[in-house]
Image (cartoon, rainbow, N blue to C red):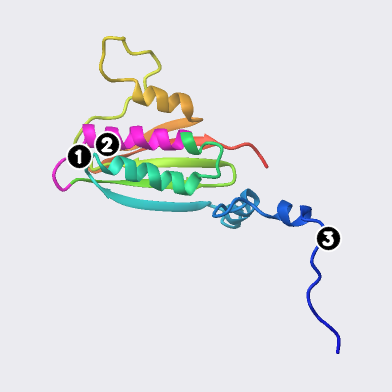
Amino acid sequence: MTDIAPQLPTSAAPITAARHAVGKPRPELIHAMVALRPGGLIWRRTFLGHLDQVSHARRFVRLLLDDSPCGKDAELIVSELVSNALRHTSSGQAHGSFIVEVIRKVTSIRICVYDCGWGGTPKFRQKHSALSEEGGRGLMIVAALASKVGYRGTQAVGHVVWAQFDLPAQ
């Protein structure tokens, strides 16, 4: 009778090279999954309009973009956009809500925050705010971190405010 036991490699190098950190998918596999869909992958989540939901929105983005070079910046951006939605629109009032959307393509990542409207219109200022002003720097930081920023919508139906990162070709 012949022994059919599998042959073990003599060196651990090939096994180690194939492994990635436990619990983390390999970047090339993520890139391949994203490339399968021409429009990219889209995730959306609705949150209650409470300030304690800002950290949940950050965690949502962190989970989706943990492997991305812009993941940390995307977390900061979603935090700012959500905080603005809660502070300046009816999203932060009783029964309010907001939606965070992440669109991941091979060439870009876009973070979108949808609000309930009936508030201010986003202003991506190019000038620095006076040091004595309490606010006005958040969207400037968003614009500095992202490749592109913008918004659309109206006070009656709500706005979507977005920030996009252009990714280097792979």
Q: Residues within 10 Å of mark 1 (few under 14, many from 20)?
A: many
Q: Amino acid at mark 2?
A: Ala
Q: Earlier in the sequence, mark 1 or mark 2?
A: 2
Question: Please, what is the dominant secondary structure of the magenta stretch?
Answer: helix
The span picked out in magenta is 73-95
Say the numbered circle drawn on residue 85. Answer: 2
Q: Tell me the CA gap for discs 3 and 1.
A: 61 Å
The residue drawn where x is 50% and y is 53% is 41
Question: Does the stretch in magenta take in 92?
Answer: yes
Residue plotted at (38% across, 37% down): 78
| Image x and y of residue 53, in percent | 28, 44
The residue pinned by badge 3 equals 10
Q: Quarter holding the N terminus?
A: bottom right
Query: If the image is split into quadrants, where does the C terminus sit?
Result: top right
Amino acid type of disc 3? Thr
| Kind of residue at badge 1 | Gly
Q: CA distance from mark 1 to mark 2?
A: 7 Å
> Does residue 114 appear to the left or right of 39 in the view shown?
left
Mark 3 and mark 1 residues within 8 Å of each other at the beta carbon: no
Q: Earlier in the sequence, mark 3 or mark 2?
A: 3
- The residue positioned 79% from the left and 77% from the top of the image is 5
| Mark 1 touches mark 2? (CB < 8 Å) | yes
Q: Is residue 91 magenta?
A: yes
Q: Is residue 107 left or right of residue 80?
A: right
Query: Which residue is located at x 34 percent, y 20 percent?
Result: 137
Residue 18 position in % (x across, y down): 71, 55
Q: Which residue is mark 1?
A: 92
Q: Secondary structure at mark 3?
A: loop
Mark 2 closeness class: few <14, some 14–19, many ≥20 residues within 10 Å = many
